[in-house]
Amino acid sequence: MASERVVYYPMTRLLLLPIIVVCALLSTAITLIRAQTYDDQTIRDILLPADCAPPCFMGIRPGLTRAKEAYALLTANPWVGDISSHIDAGCCTIALNWKWNGKQPVVLEGGENTIYLAFNPTTGEQIVQDIALHTHILAGDAVLLLGGWPAHESGALQGLNKAFVEAFYSQQRMHLTATVPCPLAYWRLWQAPITMAMSKNSRGISGMKPMNEVC
């Protein structure tokens, strides 16, 4: 019986070791990433503060906190930098603006933030009406913490090559807004930073289209 001839491929054998090494490194990296605990505490403290009933941010509560109390809370906060005030363009509404001083969590970077005040004729004082925050919190992270995407309280508006998506969480009295490139898809939305708006008197979504009808 004739013996079988064994044919060797030197180039294949040379390439085999680097391929094995690369696969091992990728497997190790994936394992380490999956083993890491998702640290959402900072985002949770911002969206769902344990020591303040919603709607609330940094101890400031729309519908309850007076203007001088809001200013004092901003001044005392170690994250807050410059504070200014102006009359809102909507007429007769005073707004407090502030910028961060660099000591705030990274997820709060995103520009100027605003507290809108409304005059209470009964008490003769300005009361916090709305809080608007520009953040680097990703929509996907916010959705995970707030209990899922509110399909019946969300919508979108068509922009130029982008969509403006909004969702309302009634329990927290919170609107989340994100700008998403077209074509609009959930994976793009989950990766978009959000703007938060909190108001005691906030309502649901109106005048917006379902997401599947936009771009």
Image: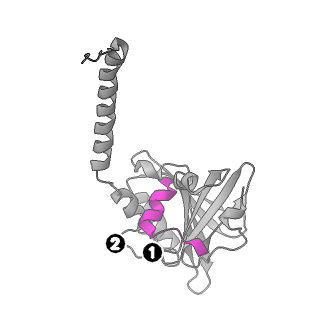
173 vs 60, nearest the viewer: 173
For residue 156, say whether it is visible. no
Query: Is residue 139 found inside the magenta-colored segment of the image?
Result: yes
Q: Quadrant of the C terminus?
A: bottom right
Q: Residue 54: which disc?
A: 1
Q: Position of residue 185 (x, y in %)?
A: 61, 55
For residue 168, say whether it is visible. yes
Q: Which quarter of the picture shows residue 132?
A: bottom right
Query: Residue at the location (60% across, 75% down)?
Result: 152
Which residue type carries mark 1?
Pro
Is residue 192 depicted above or below 27 in this figure? below
**Regarding mark 2 in the picture, which secondary structure is present there?**
loop
| Residue located beneath label 2 in the image | 51
* Residues rendered magenta in the picture: 135-152
Q: Which quarter of the picture shows residue 72?
A: bottom left
213 vs 125, nearest the viewer: 213
Q: Is residue 57 left or right of residue 8?
A: right
